[in-house]
Image (cartoon, helix red, strand yellow):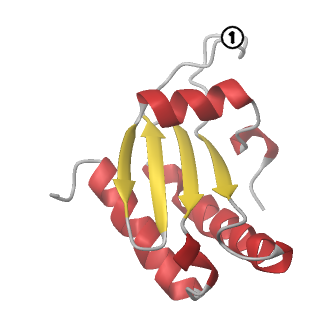
C-alpha cells in the first residue's frame, strides 16, 4: 500500500500529470510524469513528496481483475518512489493487456517506462 502522503487524489493533479507531463508507453501500461511539480495545496517550504495515482479502466477486465492490477501497481510503485524527483506527480494508466500480465511483466514495463522518463532510455 502507498503511504497517504504519496497518493494522488485530486482530479486536478491527475489532469496536470497527464496533460503537462511527459509520457512513456509500454505494452501493458502508460506512465505519465510531471517532474518536480510544486503542490500549491501543500503548506510550508519543504519539498513535497512524490505522489502517484492509478487509472485502470473497464477495458482491463472485470472488477476483480481491475483491483488485482491496481494492487500490483501500487505495490510496485511504492518501491520506485525514491527514484523519482521530489514533488513529482505520476499517473500509471493500465492498458487492456495489463489484466493478463503477470507481476514480473508489470514490473518490467513500469521500470522501463520510468527509466525512459528519467532520461535513461531512448525511444
Q: Quadrant of residue 1?
A: bottom right
Q: Residue at the left extreme?
A: 122
Left or right of residue 121, residue 11 in this image: right
* Circle 1: element type: loop
> In percent of the image, x 62 and y 35: which residue is there?
14
Q: Residue at x 75, y 30 (%)?
A: 10
Residue 6 coordinates in the image, percent (x, y): 69, 43
Q: Which residue is mark 1?
A: 44
Q: Is residue 119 above or below residue 5?
A: below
> Residue 114: percent from the left, percent from the top?
39, 57
Query: Within the image, what quadrant is residue 112 found in?
Result: bottom left
State how many labels appear. 1
- Which of 95 and 87 lies nearest the eye of the viewer? 95
Query: Measured from the top left, where is residue 41 in percent x and y?
Result: 72, 14
Note whether residue 86 is visible.
Answer: no
Regarding residue 116, the answer to whether it shows in the image is yes
Amino acid at each position: 500500500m502507498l503511504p497517504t502522503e504519496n497518493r494522488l487524489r485530486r482530479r486536478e493533479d491527475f489532469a496536470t500529470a497527464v496533460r503537462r507531463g511527459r509520457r512513456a508507453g509500454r505494452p501493458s501500461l502508460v506512465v505519465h510524469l510531471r517532474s518536480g511539480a510544486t503542490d500549491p495545496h501543500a503548506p510550508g517550504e519543504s519539498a513535497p513528496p512524490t505522489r502517484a495515482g492509478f487509472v485502470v479502466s473497464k477495458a482491463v477486465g472485470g472488477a476483480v481483475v481491475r483491483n488485482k492490477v491496481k494492487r500490483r501497481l501500487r505495490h510496485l510503485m511504492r518501491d520506485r518512489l525514491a527514484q523519482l524527483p521530489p514533488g513529482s506527480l505520476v499517473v500509471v494508466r493500465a492498458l487492456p493487456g495489463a489484466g493478463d500480465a503477470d507481476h514480473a511483466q508489470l514490473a518490467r514495463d513500469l521500470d522501463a517506462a520510468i527509466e525512459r522518463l528519467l532520461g535513461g532510455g531512448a525511444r
